[in-house]
Image (cartoon, rainbow, N blue to C red):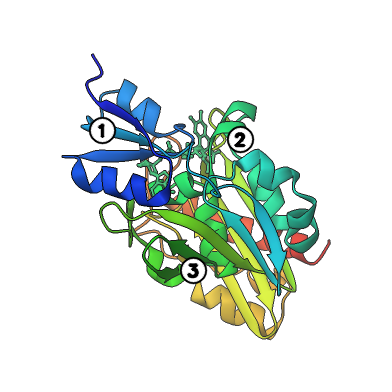
């Protein structure tokens, strides 16, 4: 039996208070990770606090060179947004490749990065585009956010409200998907904004990370040849039934090369 109290919050404040008052609460956004977790009995929260009734948690806007996406915006909305397609096509592409139509229509960007699955797509965009995460308490820079396997800088009860992506001069995203779930075996987001280059990797390690050697090579010459001979060490990479650490390391180079080519319109 599922044994939890379902609460539907009507405001951010009410959600945070319900969380603080409960013994062991979980927020629910799209439920695409939380519900399977409960069904598999991997978690037994005392309370599930549904964010679906909280106003002003969905929507996309572009202003001052920044794409702002509210936390409960679903992946399908990001994929279909003309504003996102125009400002950061690689981000719209990333969202369009998540899971299947049901996952894209229920799953949300806030839920995805709060969960921080090592194989999720959005973490590559957070670090590869240098996003800022807004919560009900503070703002968190991309470099401070992902900490370890399913671990982020979020404190207990802290609520993601919005993610801001600076619009790059160019960006590309490539992933090698698990053919069953579409989760990333490896996904790489590369971007260039002025003299700054970012290479954000997901799927390969415990959490998303940047590749400094690739970034400095691309800062010298933003061309796919610049990364084709850069290989990352596989010692700390994920190894599972889907791919060995050695194979994931290989894929980082291949996906980075393809992402740069895409960013260059090749
Ligand atoms: C079959 C399947 C295939 C999938 N394939 C992919 C894929 O290819 N790529 C990919 O990236 N993802 C994939 N996913 C995951 C999907 O993208 C979900 O969006 C994501 O896992 C969670 O989003 P959600 O909105 O459903 O969050 P929920 O399941 O509601 O919540 C997830 C976690 O985040 C917390 N949370 C939710 N919202 C907030 C918030 N605003 N602030 C703080 N904490 C919050 C919850 O408490 C919970 O711990 C797949 C999922 C399924 C079921």
**Mark 3 neighbour density, 10 Å: few (under 14) some (14–19) many (20 or more):** some
- Residue at the spot of label 1: 47
Structural distance between the alpha carbons of marks 3 and 2: 26 Å
Label 3 C-beta lies within 8 Å of the nearest ligand 1 atom: no
Q: Image quarter for residue 36?
A: top left
Q: Between 230 and 110, which is closer to the camera in this rendering?
A: 110
Residue at point 48% right, 43% down? 54
Q: Which mark is in front, 3 or 2?
A: 2
- Residue at the spot of label 3: 210
Q: Position of residue 175 (x, y in %)?
A: 61, 48
Structural distance between the alpha carbons of marks 3 and 1: 36 Å
Q: Mark 3 vs mark 2: which is more N-terminal? A: 2
Residue at point 66% right, 54% down? 60
Q: Which mark is residue 104?
A: 2
Label 2 C-beta lies within 8 Å of the nearest ligand 1 atom: yes
Quadrant in the picture for the C terminus: bottom right
Q: Between 227 and 147, which is closer to the camera in this rendering?
A: 147
Q: Position of residue 127 (x, y in %)?
A: 51, 65
Q: Which mark is in front, 2 or 1?
A: 1
**Mark 1 neighbour density, 10 Å: few (under 14) some (14–19) many (20 or more):** many
Left or right of 123, for residue 194: right
Q: Image quarter for residue 124?
A: bottom right
Q: Mark 3: which secondary structure?
A: strand
Q: Mark 3 vs mark 1: which is more N-terminal? A: 1
């Amino acid at each position: 039996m599922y044994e939890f109290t379902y609460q539907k919050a009507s405001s951010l404040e009410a959600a945070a208070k319900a969380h603080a008052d409960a013994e062991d609460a979980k927020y629910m956004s799209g439920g695409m990770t939380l519900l399977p977790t409960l069904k598999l009995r991997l978690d037994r929260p005392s309370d599930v606090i549904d964010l679906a009734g909280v106003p002003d948690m969905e929507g996309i806007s572009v202003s001052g060179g920044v794409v702002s996406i509210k936390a409960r915006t679903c992946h399908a909305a990001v994929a279909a947004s003309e504003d996102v397609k125009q400002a950061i096509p690689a981000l719209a592409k990333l969202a369009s490749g998540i899971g299947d139509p049901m996952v894209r229509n229920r799953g949300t960007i806030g839920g995805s990065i709060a969960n921080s699955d090592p194989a999720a797509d959005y973490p590559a965009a957070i670090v590869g585009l240098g996003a800022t995460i807004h919560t009900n308490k503070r703002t968190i820079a991309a470099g401070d956010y992902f900490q370890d396997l399913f671990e982020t800088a979020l404190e207990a009860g802290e609520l993601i409200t919005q993610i801001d992506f600076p619009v790059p001069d160019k960006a590309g995203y490539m992933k090698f998907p698990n053919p069953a779930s579409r989760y990333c075996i490896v996904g790489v987001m590369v971007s260039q904004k002025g003299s700054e280059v970012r290479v954000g990797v997901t799927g390969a390690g415990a959490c998303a990370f940047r590749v400094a050697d690739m970034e400095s090579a691309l800062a010298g010459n933003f061309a796919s040849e610049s990364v084709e001979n850069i290989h990352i060490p596989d010692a700390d990479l994920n190894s599972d039934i889907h791919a060995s650490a050695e194979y994931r390391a290989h894929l980082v180079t291949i996906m980075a090369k393809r992402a740069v080519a895409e960013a260059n319109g090749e």
